[in-house]
Image (tube, grey):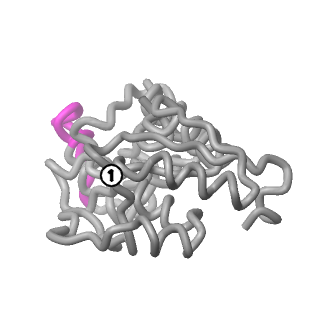
Amino acid sequence: MLRSLEEDPTLVTGIVRSGYLAVVPRGVALKGAERREQLVNARTYGDVRRTAWGEWVDDRDMLLDHYYDQYVAEHPDVDLDGLADEELWDLVSPSDDAPFSMDGHPAFDSSVSDSAQSYEADIDLTTDAWIPREIASCYGERPSGWSAMPAREYEEPDFLYPERHREEIETELRGHGFTVVHDERLILKYMTGR
């Protein structure tokens, strides 16, 4: 694991979900935070298309009907009958300068679509991926009572890491050769972009 983090063997820890510790490599946290912040701050479809999330707003299979409905609402006198899906998509998909919001968008908002995906990082799975197994088995707790997310398939983490073991976990990580920085703000930004 250290070899895969050669350039920066720093792990960032934080408590962002009540009572549980998150552990993420600093490089992963910084990159994920930047990607999610770009999406959260996007104000136009062009802003989104210039990010890693562009394919989400240009998913023809998922969004053609949504964009069609918006277009018809804005242009009630236009006759779209007889157009092939590709022609229709070219006409109804939002232009780069069209205003964008995640709220109400079926790619991001599960309150309007069962097909919406969460852009947020799954902090428990990220922690599982990076914490050494011997630390996980010593301090981790098996999750219970978790249910499937409505808009996407949910993968249950192997362990959750109770906040009460923070000092022991961070000490063990340092003993494995990692530099450990506690930064809840970065962990939260990695998760949500906010």
Q: Residues within 10 Å of mark 1 (few under 14, many from 20)?
A: many
Q: Is residue 92 visible?
A: yes
Residue 78 part of the magenta segment: yes
**Residue 94: which quarter of the image?**
top left
151 and 100: which is toward the camera: 151
Left or right: 22 in relation to 3: left
The answer to whether 88 is drawn above or below residue 94 in the figure is below
The answer to whether 29 is drawn above or below residue 46 in the figure is below
Residue matched to label 1: 107
Q: Position of residue 125 (x, y in %)?
A: 44, 64
Left or right: 104 in relation to 23: left
Q: Position of residue 96 (x, y in %)?
A: 51, 32
Q: Residue at x 57, y 45 (%)?
A: 32
188 and 63: which is toward the camera: 188
26 and 177: which is toward the camera: 177
Left or right: 147 in relation to 181: left
132 and 54: which is toward the camera: 132
Q: Secondary structure at mark 1?
A: loop
Residue 161 part of the magenta segment: no
Q: Is residue 45 visible?
A: no
Q: Position of residue 167 (x, y in %)?
A: 49, 46
Q: Residue at x 22, y 64 (%)?
A: 149
Q: Quadrant of the N terminus?
A: bottom right
Q: Residue at x 38, y 69 (%)?
A: 159
The answer to whether 113 is drawn above or below residue 40 in the figure is below
Q: Position of residue 52 (x, y in %)?
A: 58, 48
Q: Residue at x 39, y 67 (%)?
A: 140
Looking at the picture, which amino acid does disc 1 mark? Answer: Ala
Left or right: 95 in relation to 112: right
What segment is highlighted magenta in the picture?
Answer: 70-81
